[in-house]
Amino acid sequence: MEVVVVLLIIIAVVALIGVSSSLKVVKQYERGVIYRFGRVNRLPKEPGPRMLVPFMDKMTKVNMQVVTMPVPSQDGITRDNVSVRVDAVLYFRVIDPIRATVDVQNYQFAMLQVAQTSLRSIIGKSELDDLLSGRERLHEGLELMLSTPATGWGVHIDRVEIKDVALPESMKRSMARQAEADRERRARIITADGELQASQKLSEAARTMDANPSALQLRLLQTVVEVAAEKNSTLVMPFPVEMLRFFDRAAGSGAGQGPKPRESATATGEVTAAQPQPAVEPGADEPPAIDGKQQGPLQIPDPRTSEE
């Protein structure tokens, strides 16, 4: 009797172990692939508790979530002969768990290797400007290159993006100089355009003031008010040129009423009025003739010589 009880206990323990090993729970984000004697069941198990045949079935769980896989940095030379280092990030998920486990040994490792080779290939086909600014087209190209083998493995590529582009220091300095030169060019163009517009406005203002002289006086008063608002101790007051011309005309009209004597300058720089000279008769400065002979000019003895 005791032997029978022991056998029953052993059978119950074995059955309990078999049931516990046969009962599997598939989570919501997983799918179960059943292998019975090595042959795969074409219908994957949905989430929930699943009972397997002991010692006959074996189940492999496949994660159906989106996998974020960083792609290591890849060194390459662009089409315009610039050495760069580019890294990317890949987002994919399994859509066919049977193909992901049967057709490929390790689909995650396979996707990593394909992503590296595709990234290196896209670097050689692109230029530096495309890697820096035109990344949307490169992302589409990478996704297309990865989708071709991934579809056969039951994997769907959600998106792939280039994360960073590392440039040599010499290239960074060259790009910085280029950007600085471009900003300086735009600054000069903007300054020249501003000067052109200012000159046009000033010419229009000059024509307006020329048509209305009172506008110039009002502008002068406004300038004085602006200068006085700065609390300066010195005030520069411009003198109208028209007033100087008025004084010049007034002085010229007053001096033109009387006769102006002829002036002559002396050796000392003083100006004296020239005295009227008496009329000289013809031949008055000639010496008189003696005995019908013409005499030469009179000789005046030098007082410094001795008297003869």
Image: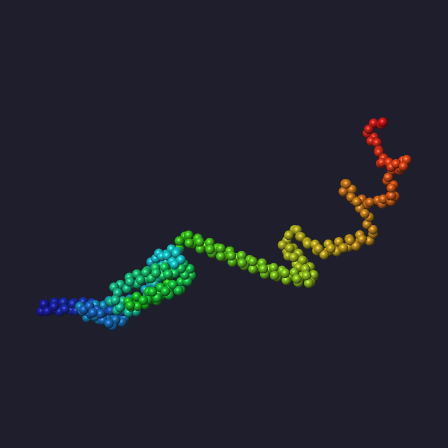
Relative to 301, is 135 on the left or the right? left
Q: Is residue 38 visible?
A: yes
Identify which residue, 42 or 292, lies in the foreground: 292
Q: Identify the residue at image location x=10%, y=69%.
A: 4
Residue at (66, 59) in percent of width and height? 219
In the image: residue 157, left or right of residue 175? left
Coloration mode: rainbow
Which residue lies at the image location 44% right of the left edge and 53% below the top edge? 173
Residue 172 in which image quadrant: bottom left
Question: How many numbered discs?
Answer: 0
Q: Of 168 and 24, which appears nearest the observer?
A: 168
What's the residue at 47%, 56% (across, down)? 179
Instruction: Return the x and y of residue 127 as percentages of the image width and height.
Output: 40, 59
Q: Position of residue 176 (x, y in %)?
A: 45, 54
Image quadrant in which the N terminus is located: bottom left
Picture quadrant of residue 205: bottom right
Q: Position of residue 24 (x, y in %)?
A: 23, 69
Residue at the farthest front position? 292
User: In the image shown, does 229 or 185 lie closer to the viewer?
Assistant: 185
Q: Is residue 9 left or right of residue 62?
A: left
Side of 229 relative to 88 (left or right): right
In the image, residue 169 above or below residue 23: above
The quarter in which the C terminus is drawn is top right
In percent of width and height, residue 119 lies at 34, 61
In this view, 31 is above or below 259: below
